[in-house]
Amino acid sequence: MSNEAWEGRRAFISANDAVSYAVRLCRPEVIAAYPITPQTSVVEKLSEFIAGGGMDCQFINVESEHSAMAAVMGAAMMGCRTFTASSSQGLMYMCEMLHYVSGSRFPVVMMNANRTLAAPWNIYGDHRDSLAMRDAGWLQVYVENAQEALDTVLQAYRVAEDAAVRTPAMVCLDGFVLTHTYEIVNIPGQREVDAFLPPYAPGENVLDLANPRSLCISVAPEWQTEFRCQQQAAMEAAKGAIARADGDFAAAFGRRWGGMVEEYRCEDADYVLLGMGSVMGTTRLVVDKLRAEGLKAGLMKIRFFRPFPREEIAALGRRVKGIGVIDRDVSFGNAGALYTEAKAALYSAGGASPHTVNFIAGLSGRDITKEHIETMYRKVMNAAAGGAEREIQFAGLRWEEW
Amino acid sequence: MKEIRWHGRGGQGGFTAARLLGMAASLSPGYYVQAFPSFGPERRGAPVLGFTRIDTKPIHDHSKVYSCDYVVVLDESLLAVVDVFEGLKADGIMLINSARGGEAFTASGRQVYTIDATGIALAVLGQPVTSTPMFGAFVGATGLVDLPAALTAVDMTLPADSRAKNREVVEWAYNELRRKINA
């Protein structure tokens, strides 16, 4: 397809296709990938673009996800902008290389189609795969719809390649509910994207035959701590880069997604649900319904899980009565991962301690209904009023009244 | 918001029909649209679903469709194995691929239209692919989008070598439904 046919168009496409168009617009030079449901159509479409001459990019077919990440790391060492995508078991297989890429500070961007982990095996969506990679040293951002998926890929390259950040980024889309759902998506023009996203400038972190150096090195214990301290500093620096990317993106394209978090009707809210991904769209409708009934409900969409929005959550904690956290995951033996981190952030809220409840929901594609979300708000209100509520609850368990 | 559920068997094009309607609606700047399949592995011959949501406001809902304004059945044999009327609103409309008349399904208490979509598909396409005739019939029965938008959606969605025949199928089914309603 020629550029003129799709650039600047209002298209009706799946979120996977939206990611493919976004990646095309970002002009990566090397893509290496291995297929896995529900990610596959992203890299299929990219390989079609390349085969059709619409993308000047090398597509490397590899035999595994581990090799996919190794291949894009090699390309990044040569100063190339790169892309890959995976999901679930594939992401697990990639795990070792995720750490190599982040520790070596290559700003690879990947898409993860969120899918649960075996066993029991299935292919449906939850956040257990990417959250298991929490400590891999990657930026992690979760999106709500197809337009946000496209826009966030463009922003992810900007943030990851920022000279103060130089950290890889994982853009997470709920499997099927986003990846296979068709929505209306505005595809920006190439010229506007080129202006927003200049070519990758690797600085000194590149192999140069005229000026040999070692990359992706070994270091002794005497130096390892300093490398880790720099990784942590880069993640903290990413918070500013994320805000700048959001602002510049809004100026260029007229859409704003909020940066680290997006608050909806939180300005005077007493009861707020936190969550990530597509469920936050459904939650907006419940907020509107409860507001119409006079209840002060709001939501905070956590976009970036890494770096974590500690400051935003602490500030929220100082002004609300109750917070519920929806987790599409569970860390067995403790609680949901988002809940654990949000509660830690609230501890630094300076004496404020709103009541908190954790709702484990939407595991492996289980639908999170508007009725379930409304029940979550009512449980948070009950807890805030001093009523008895278990702190950690599985939403809609078939052997419980919900 | 209008919510539409499409019943088919894997391979008949139930999700294609859901996407064709979404594409046709997306051509109108005032509409927001979602289309999605019943998620999971694709199994030829097994009962599958497609969904279309159309609204004049942005669609934030990412939960499943539980209540429908319209239900379309691409394969009459599904009536024996699936409750196709489940969730169809009392004033909702049912559209069934059947050589029988709509009166054969009045026990449901809903407005039911029928069309012999398999016959149209076999006559024009030479295969019992009922997605495009049922899409055309849906447009004729509901007027949610107009016929030119439906034909453009065929051009934008289907492979180039099948467009002309499928446009013919859509127009045939559309006109047949219009005749039934106006009769």
Image (spheres, coloured by chain):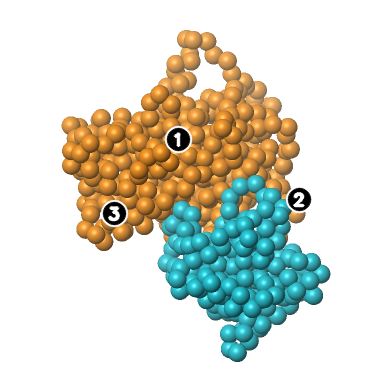
Looking at the image, residue A133 sits to the left or right of residue B101; the answer is left
- Please identify, in this view, whether the residue under mark 1 or under mark 2 is nearer the observer: 1
Crowd class of label 3 (few under 14; some 14 to 19; many from 20; radius 10 Å): some
The kind of residue tagged 3 is: Arg
Q: Which residue is mark 2?
A: A51
Q: What's the CA distance linking mark 2 and mark 3?
A: 46 Å
Secondary-structure class at tag 3: loop
Q: What's the CA distance linking mark 1 and mark 3?
A: 26 Å
Q: As drawn, which residue projects farthest toward the right?
A: B126
Q: Which residue is mark 3?
A: A265
Front-lying residue, A197 or B38: B38
Q: Which residue is mark 1?
A: A329
The kind of residue tagged 2 is: Ala
Is the residue at mark 1 from the same chain as the one at mark 2? yes
Looking at the image, residue A293 sits to the left or right of residue A208; the answer is left
| First in sequence: mark 2 vs mark 3 | 2
Instruction: Tell me the quadrant of the picture where the C terminus of chain A can be found.
Output: top left
Rendering colour (chain B): cyan
Name the residue: 73% across, 77% down.
B168
- Please identify, in this view, whether the residue under mark 2 or under mark 3 is nearer the observer: 3
Q: What's the CA distance linking mark 1 and mark 2?
A: 38 Å
Image vertical order of residue A191 relative to residue A335, above or below: below
> On what subunit does the disc labeled 1 rest?
A
Name the residue: 49% across, 44% down.
A366
Rendering colour (chain A): orange
> On what subunit does the disc labeled 2 rest?
A
| First in sequence: mark 1 vs mark 3 | 3
Name the residue: 49% across, 58% down.
B65
